[in-house]
Image (cartoon, coloured by chain):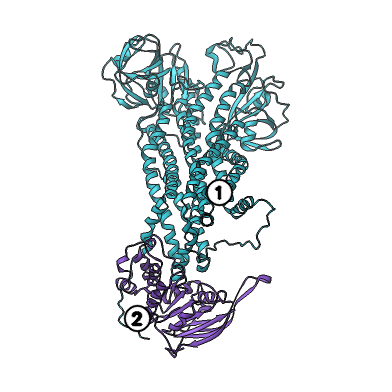
Amino acid sequence: MSQNDIAFLTVKGLKKSFGSGDTRQEVLKGMDFTVGRGEFCVLLGPSGSGKSTLLNILGGIDSADEGEISINGDKLAEMDEKSLTRYRRRHLGYVFQMYNLIPDLNVKENIETGAYLSDKPLDIDELLKILGLYEHRYKLPNQLSGGQQQRVSIGRAIVKNPDILLCDEPTGALDYNTSKEILQLIEEVNKKYGNTIIMVTHNEAIKQMADHVIKLRDGRIRHDIVNTEKLSAAEIEW
Amino acid sequence: MEKKSISFGTRPKDPLRRRVWRDIRRDWRRYLMICIMLVATIGFVSGMYVANNSMLNTLSRNVSALNREDGHFTLSQKADSSVIDAVESGELPEMFGEDEDFEPVPVTVYELFYKDTAEGLAGKNGSTGTVRIYGERRDVDMYDILDGRAPGNENEIIIDRMHADNAEIKVGDRITADGEEFEVVGLAAFVDYSTLYESNTDTMFDALTFNVGMVTDEGYERISAPEEANYAFTYVREPADEYEEKEMSDSFLKVLFAQTAVSGCEGLEITDFVPAYANNALNFAEDDIGKDKAMGGVLLYILTAVLAFIFAVTISTTLEQEASVIGTLRASGYSRGELLRYYMSAPLLIVIISAVIGNVLGYTVMKDIVADMYYGSYSLPTFETLWTPEAFIRTTVVPIVLMLVINVIVITRALKLSPLRFLRHDLKRTKRKKAVRLPRWGFLHRFRLRVFLQNIPNYIMLFVGITFVMVLISMAVGMPETLSYYQDSMGDMMFAEDQVILKSTADENGDTIITSADGAERFSMASLERKSDVYNEEVAVYGVEADSRYVRIGECAEGSVYISKAYADKYGVGDGDTIKLSEKYEHKDYEWKVQGIYDYSAAVAVFMEREQLNEVFGRDSGDFTGYMSDEMITDIGREYIAKEITSQDMIKVADQLDKSMGAFMVYFQYVCFIVAAIILYLLTKIIIEKNERSISMAKILGYGNGEIASLYLIPTAAVVFFSEFLAIYLGFKLMEFFWRLIMMKMSGWFAFILPFSGFVKEFLLVFAAYVIITVLDYMRIRRIPKALALKNME
């Protein structure tokens, strides 16, 4: 924890395996960590290290075999399907590597799908300006570049002003310059709205802009570091 | 960290709602097909129900509105008013003494005299048949003028509309009756002639050469043909049910006989007596219109099942295509209920739009088409289109509820999967653990086999769809084949070449009526009913000579009978079973054990020895109803014959059957073909769509459109080809079942016939349709973009 002394997210003894019998594969082998409110936390690791699985469990779209996750005092394991949905609706925002925009809704409408989930969403026009999409708000996703689509995806996640923004390789499908733009945007969002951000990436350079870096390998946490020499997104290079 | 300078907005309306119309636009072909199918189903079937119901209602309403008779009788001459008064009292003459069981039946008697005369077209030689001319009708058996007006002077006439159509007579034309010329000023439907039976004993009606007309009283005087002293009567007190109607009719006949006998009028005799319930001219059309409903009902069952299938297939395909969107929305916090409502919206909208169009068509165009079919056979009045709740429920409410239920089940079941499974496009519930090892064939063959194995669930769906198609085509092809088979063989289904039913077994001198026709045999007959909740079937009970050459049954044990093959087939009755039949108008039942099945398919009938029948029905042991013979019976006076049935009459019956059912079959054929083509189109479209990603990937790898088509279309073509064989058989079996359902709601029985040529026709039709669809599929394959395989994949 760095920015906040109070643990906002606590993970204890988290285990997850896939398959059964001979084909059983343990993906998370017992994880313990905490993330503070408003922190920018990066989950770093190579393919197969379990970072996406961990993110999915944190996001309540996958379940753990063992262990406990507590977000702001709410224990995910104790929630039934309805409560989890409600939880995701109120507290979580998701950004995927492949954007997953709704192809026949325009930019603004795609963001509205997120805004609809909140009783008190952010001002969409202002958000569109922050995202640099105001001029493109009536375009369909297929009329946008990859970077612009990812901006829409971030907008859709952030518009409901979630407590936690979960980003799964948000720059994985983007070129260098676009990736940097997206990282700057996420940084700006974090600063402006104060959301806790948990980002999965295999890009080592991104750890430099995080408050908190958790390095995974083979389903275990190898390093849990508080970054004291944080750089801005504009400063990092790879 | 404190959130700073944040501007909040308001919660927008659900943006997914805006997507509903776009969903429909994007997938307009599929929705259009579903729409066409629904419109066809709702339009055709509700048109039929509406016309049927409206017509039956009109006929029923006209019984009182046009004061339809409760029966009529003909006397050998006009009766004195004293006789008529006595008859109207419903009392037996005093000289008959007191009969405690006798209940007087007061009636109102109306003179409804007529003259039968030759009809011709003015200025043309030759006759167009017989016209039965009545004077002006004022009190009973009124009429509905469909075109023109009532006659205003002695030179004007109105005639039956049906006959006018057949003889191409129009308002303004001039016809001759008994050599006198009349101007046709109106075409009408007479309430006592909804079916043009010249005589109630005729085997079949004849709207071609028999006509009914009405002129003014002065016009009536112009015709010099002999007048028939025909009287219509209505009961003063309406009978409560058909049993009471029969009792009242019997009592009234007793009074009529008695009163004419004691009248003192020389030569006054009853020459004809027909109560309404036994009058074919009144009842035939109504009964026939009722039969169409049975056929329509079964077609609706089939179409509803097809719709259910299409809804299920369509929604599961939509869910597969939308997996990423669903996964994202669920991960973002959209609830299952919200997604359920959203994914229900487009199909629901389509069903509602189709229902509106279908009902509008049903109540306008289709209703008129069906009504025209009725008008083409019967003399029916102008009918008022009625709101038909049954049609609305069965054609509209049921499909909508069905669609809702199927969608709710399929979507709810699918949404039970985790958002992650949607995001990974992993929607299969069962996972194949290991890849199937394939034989060492060439690569392309193995590729095709893989395509086949991958698509087994889709092919099962295709097979089910083809089976539905086969049921529909079996219906379209088989029904006319069945009719024509029976038309062709009806003449051979006679017991004997000639069959005469006598009015009485004794002539005027009291001698038994005999015939010298070679091989003539006496038989007795009775008519009973097999009662059921669905339909009360009239069953002919024959009593034949012990060693009959025409009906070869064995000796019947006591309480045992033979039944016709038609009876056995229709009701699934076999040797040793017990059958129960009832008197139609009395509360009296008969139970017999089935001793054997007699190979006779023309009617639902029971056979026993004549003596046995006479005993059962309390007749004298030597009593008989008529004669049957292979040699034409020519030596019995016409005055003694109630009915004569020759093979020609049977062919007439079959022709009429074709006329009354044939038109509907053409109507059904259109629906069946439309729906069958749509099913095939939708299913093959789905198979290509489900393989879009693989096809796109194959394109990226460098496979050409032709190669891809051969990889993906050949396995499907093979499946269609082999499915057809099994589906044809299943379709036929299902159609046999549905046919039984139809026949259960109407009298008689004929098995569903589909000759080998019918099977070949079905096979070729479906395969030809598939070949056309393959061309469309090839075009679809060409349109699949390479980028598809790279998009939206986790």
Q: Residue furthest left?
A: B152
Which circle, 2 or 1, is nearer the viewer?
1
Residue depicted at x 33% and y 11%: B122
Circle 1 is placed at which residue position? B707
Task: Chain letter for mark 1, please.
Answer: B
Q: Kindly indicate which chain is depicted in cyan in the rendered structure.
A: B
Q: From where the camera sits, is residue A3 visible?
A: yes
Of residues B563 and B124, the one drawn nearer to the viewer in this rendering? B124
Q: From where the camera sits, is residue B590 visible?
A: no
Q: At label 1, which amino acid type do we have?
A: Glu
Task: Chain letter for mark 2, please.
Answer: A
Task: Indicate the position of residue B731 as horizontal and vertical percent values.
Answer: 59, 41
**Dot 1: within a 10 Å radius of its alpha carbon, few (fewer than 14), some, or many (20 or more) residues?**
some
Co-location on one chain, circles 2 and 1: no
Of residues B647 and B108, the one drawn nearer to the viewer in this rendering? B647
Q: In the picture shown, does residue B172 fall above or below A67?
A: above
Task: Assign a secondary structure to mark 1.
Answer: helix
Task: Indicate the position of residue B428 as horizontal and vertical percent values.
Answer: 57, 61
Q: Kindly indicate which chain is depicted in purple in the rendered structure.
A: A
Task: Indicate the position of residue B172 as horizontal and vertical percent values.
Answer: 29, 19
Q: Give residue A139's quadrant in the image.
A: bottom left
Task: Assign a secondary structure to mark 2.
Answer: helix
Q: At label 2, which amino acid type do we have?
A: Lys
* In-image side of B9 versus B674 (left or right): left
Task: Indicate the position of residue A215 as horizontal and vertical percent values.
Answer: 53, 82
Q: CA distance from mark 2 to mark 1?
A: 55 Å
* In-image side of A30 versus B124 (left or right): right
Q: Give residue B648's quadrant in the image.
A: top right
Q: In the picture shown, does residue B489 fall above or below B741?
A: above
Circle 2 is placed at which residue position? A192
Q: In the picture shown, does residue A132 fall above or below B403?
A: below
